[in-house]
Image (spheres, rainbow, N blue to C red):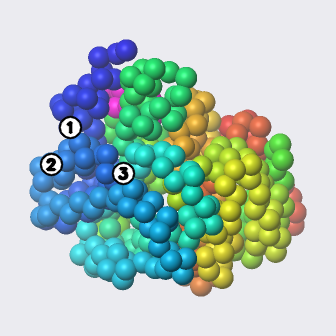
Amino acid sequence: MSSETRAAFDDPELLERFAELVIGFAANVQPGQVVAIGSEIGKEEMTRALAAAAYRHGAKFVDTSYFDLHVKRARLLYAEEDTLDYVPPWYGERILELGRLHAARVGLTGPAHPGLLSDLDPARIGRDQLPAVRETGIVVNERTTNWTAVPCPTRPWAELVHPDLDPEEAWVRLCEQILHVCRLDTDDPIASWRERAETLVGAAERITQRRLDALRYVGPGTDLTVGLLPSSKFLAARFTTVDGIVHLPNLPSEEIFTSPDPTRAEGVVRATKPLVLGGSIIRGLEVEFRDGRAVRIDADENAEVLRSYAARDETADRLGEAALVDGDGRIGALDTVFFDTLLDENAASHIALGHAYTMCVDEADAAKLNDSTIHVDFMIGSPDVSVHGLAADGTETPLLVGGAWQV
């Protein structure tokens, strides 16, 4: 048990170091900004450290919003069925107002109460998507806020990830892993992230230059072709706001991604990692696409949760993102299922049902993108899954094989 690992999340001094990386680099909070922190009951210590760092960086005001999963459980148990998809209007209006203020936003990921909803009806869970709100996608596409999502370790999460370890050992191990994947174990984490970002930006640019017509994912249980739009371009998770503020929307981030043609997805894909959605864990997920729509969603556990999400609106069963992750990132090498989309999606190539990012296409193609109320990533990549690019004439070029870039 290393003293550094303990210090990272038990010692206020190194917790402050983490908060400084998040606020000063990933979110890149500017003097005079309003800063919104989306947290959860059980993550108070990290939230307070982030708030303090934001004020040190000159924040005008820090607004913390705590979601309570126990209250959501009560709603799912007792509320009328036809009220479960109701979202009070001020939830979405808050996000839109943060965009109008050109605020900074920080979200804390990682389950604080894993398994709390596991005994409930998956169909009811799928109807209540809070704390997610559709307005977040609008603000992201408008690029008015500098934002980031970061993992916040909790002891219950540690026991979920490392059930074979003693609870204290599990806590130390999870902290150690998060310390590592966020590159806080390097002499200069910011320099390390900048170097990694340059690598990913370079890969995105090289693939974009090929003007591919489609991507094809092939592996055990997977043969899926995802069509691209004429102007689809790949980006790395290093964004710039309309005000010129560079920020890292995910910390850690190991992906490059694009927005596909929502009418062109054909084949079957098998998830390579569990998906945590609405407080439930979906294992053994398999999805079949035809004419762009997910026509079959099966799983060993909790398939009905994703089916409910995919039925949320007219285009929720179509794709909004296709992402590639190479084998040089720090998350995949740990060979650990984190049951947290932020970490697991940056360990493996993935696709997402629902809302697409307009920043990935030119204005002429923006109206063709999927505009849905959901955005659900699930992981489909592994060293055994290869990704090829298809040209308009059918020529196939390897892009990612055995976790290594081929371009």
Q: Name the residue under label 1.
A: 16
Q: Do the residues labelled 1 and 2 touch (CB within 8 Å)?
A: yes
The circle drawn on residue 52 is 2
What is the secondary structure assignment of the residue under circle 1?
helix
Q: Are marks 1 and 3 in contact (CB under 8 Å)?
A: no
Distance of label 2 from label 3 (alpha carbons): 15 Å
Residue 159 position (above or below residue 303):
above
Say which amino acid is labelled 2.
Answer: Ala
For this view, does 367 lie left or right of residue 176? right
Crowd around label 2: few <14 · some 14–19 · many ≥20 (10 Å)? some
Q: Are marks 2 and 3 in contact (CB under 8 Å)?
A: no
The part of the image, by quadrant, that contains residue 139 is bottom left
Q: Is residue 185 magenta?
A: yes
Which numbered disc, 1 or 2, marks the residue that appears first in the sequence? 1
Q: In percent of the image, x 82 and y 74: which residue is there?
A: 291
Q: What stretch is highlighted in magenta?
A: 177-187
Distance of label 1 from label 3 (alpha carbons): 15 Å
Q: Is residue 171 visible?
A: yes
Which numbered disc, 2 or 3, marks the residue that appears first in the sequence? 2
Q: Name the residue under label 3.
A: 108
What is the secondary structure assignment of the residue under circle 3?
strand
